[in-house]
Amino acid sequence: MTRTIYIVQLAQHITGYDDYDEIAARYWSSVRDQLDRQSIGSGSIKRIFVETFLSDGDDALAGLERAFPQAHSLVQHLISRGASFEEFEDPALLTELVDWARCASQELLSAKVRNVVSSGHAETSEQRQEHLKRRLDEAIGDGEKALVLVASENLPIPDGVERFIISPPELDQMARWFRAKMEEAQREMMQQAQREASESSTAGTTGSQSASSGLWTPP
């Protein structure tokens, strides 16, 4: 019997922006509708996995509610229909990968150290991918459906498992929203730098003029 995985991107939770909140709410509503339609006549989702979460059951639900409240609502909806929230990550591998990533984000001066960090990150990333793939393969039984909420796009899929990516239009809208915000922030930084340069130039000119008059004025 066919095993099936539905993949849903975790949409970042941001507060203080009504326009983003509206897009995110529509996104999770569309995801829920699509999953419900997929389940009609073909069996409901039995297992739920969430990338980057280190626990299962109530502990994972509490963490999910804090980080992704709208995703939490979807998961609760599926649990009420018989799904179980299961452990996905290997804590040792995930925390090691996070530490390697932190090292890689630093401005390392030594080529030897950079190579060690790069090699360690690549090795741990490969081990984690193998763990996630094995976890899905072992957990999903014949004919079962599972949902995986992902933080990245490179989820390893076991052999013999059908994959369906749930990607409503709102996902692209959120990506455009983020790009627009980043561009706006960059423009504001450039404008601020230009204002500071202009003020510095003006202050320098004023100081020179005051000096030529024989009076000292701080620049």
Image (cartoon, rainbow, N blue to C red):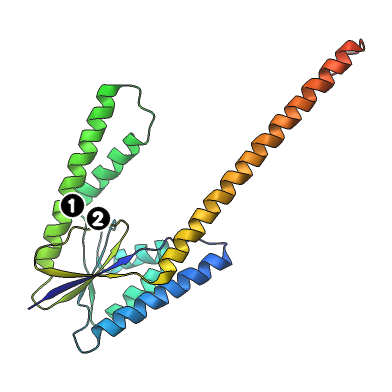
Q: Secondary structure at mark 1?
A: helix
Residue 161 appears at what percent x and percent y?
13, 69
Residue 196 appears at what percent x and percent y?
70, 33
* Residue drawn at x 14%, y 58% as measured from the top left: 133
In this view, the residue in front, 92 or 164, is: 164
Residue 219 appears anywhere in the view: no
- On residue 129, the disc is 1
Which residue bears the numbered disc 2? 154
As drawn, 194 above or below 141: above
* Residue drawn at x 92%, y 12% as measured from the top left: 213
As drawn, 40 above or below 175: below
Residue 28 appears at what percent x and percent y?
40, 73
Residue 165 appears anywhere in the view: yes
Q: Quadrant of residue 27?
A: bottom left
- On residue 38, the disc is none
Circle 2 crowding by C-alpha within 10 Å: few under 14, some 14–19, many from 20: few
In this view, the residue in front, 140 or 7, is: 7
In this view, the residue in front, 106 or 158, is: 158
Q: Secondary structure at mark 2?
A: loop
Q: Quadrant of residue 75?
A: bottom left
Tell me which amino acid carries mark 2: Asn
Circle 1 crowding by C-alpha within 10 Å: few under 14, some 14–19, many from 20: some
